[in-house]
Image: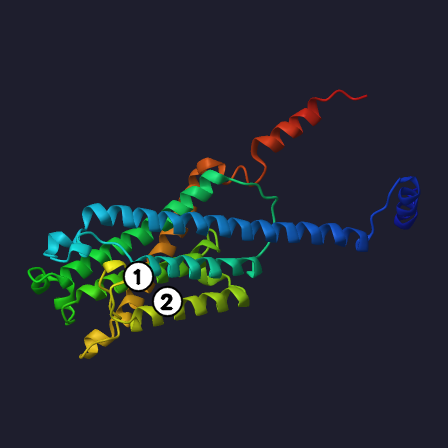
Amino acid sequence: MWVLPCRVRRDAARAAADMVLTGPGLSVVVEAMLVSRQVFQRMLSFLTYRISATLQLVCFFFIACFSLTPRNYGSADADFQFFHLPVLMFMLITLLNDGCLMTIGYDRVVPSKLPQRWNLPVVFTIAIILAAVACSSSLMLLWIALEGWGEETYPNSWFKALGLAQLKQGKVVTLLYLKISISDFLTLFSSRTGGRWFFTMAPGLVLLIGAIISLFVSSMVASFWHTSRPDGLLTEGLAWGDTNSERLLPLWVWIYCIVWWLIQDAVKVGAHKLMEWMDLFGCVSKAYGGKVVEQYMENKITEPAN
């Protein structure tokens, strides 16, 4: 049997086709798909982080107001009967947080090899897990700080066990301000990598610079805050003190936050693997098309030939 050469068959197919897409023509389509998937990844990171940061703040202050009250540790200050932050500190957290979040549009992302679609149950689950770990660590630090501040509880507190001086009332507030600020910014690096470890994908330069500036400003504010009473609440810089143990409080907060950040990222990776193993919320089947593709293929197979 005589077979036409490959080049002849190719030329015949081109002549019979209504439209022929060459390499340069297809490259535009491929580039558009890659850019759209990069934009999707950035939107996913933004949404995950925004939900987790909001939940962390709301849940922490709600639980702290009712369960970890300074009056139970002997507070005689009428403005320190329950834990809260001055409005100025809360505004600084929000301002620096949103300023850092704006840089996520310039983040370095790896486009997915598969078509993507919104799976909001998965997004909310991961955001809740990130927020739960961060909120739990903040509540634990508040408990440790109140134990280290109370006259009766200090001898048996973690502060005493670590050789740290008894915590002053004004430093309890700035201690938690710094913890919440650092946790918020570090959570961004966990939320941007999905089911992978935070160190598997380097952040974009703009995002990294924005995070460094925000962390630096938060650390300086907490360390050298002037002793004052904004909104009637006594506040004092963490670095002010007569002993090294008092001046090194910002460093202890940083170490505490980094340890809990590693735990947070490990829990996130484990949650992703568990959901993929169980195909929870269709996180695997929907990524490959799931029932939508199956129904489409069944319709094409059963469709009568014209």
User: Which mark, by number, is residue 69?
Assistant: none
Label 2 residue SS: helix
Q: How many marks?
A: 2
Q: Quadrant of the C terminus?
A: top right
Q: Quadrant of residue 301?
A: top right
Alpha carbons under labels 1 and 2: distance apart: 8 Å
Give left or right: position of 237 versus 26.
left
Say whether marks 1 and 2 touch (CB < 8 Å): yes
- Looking at the rendered structure, the kind of residue marked 1 is Tyr
Give left or right: position of 11 versus 201.
right
Give left or right: position of 280 versus 16.
left
Q: Quadrant of the N terminus?
A: top right
Between 303 and 93, the one lying in front of the other is: 93
* Residue 109, image x, y percentages: 56, 58
The residue positioned 19% from the left and 56% from the top of the image is: 79
The residue positioned 67% from the left and 25% from the top of the image is: 299
Label 1 residue SS: helix
* Residue 106, image x, y percentages: 57, 61
* Residue 29, image x, y percentages: 74, 50
**Residue under pointer 1:** 177
Answer yes or no: is residue 73 visible. Answer: yes
User: Who comes first in sequence, dot 1 or dot 2?
Assistant: 1
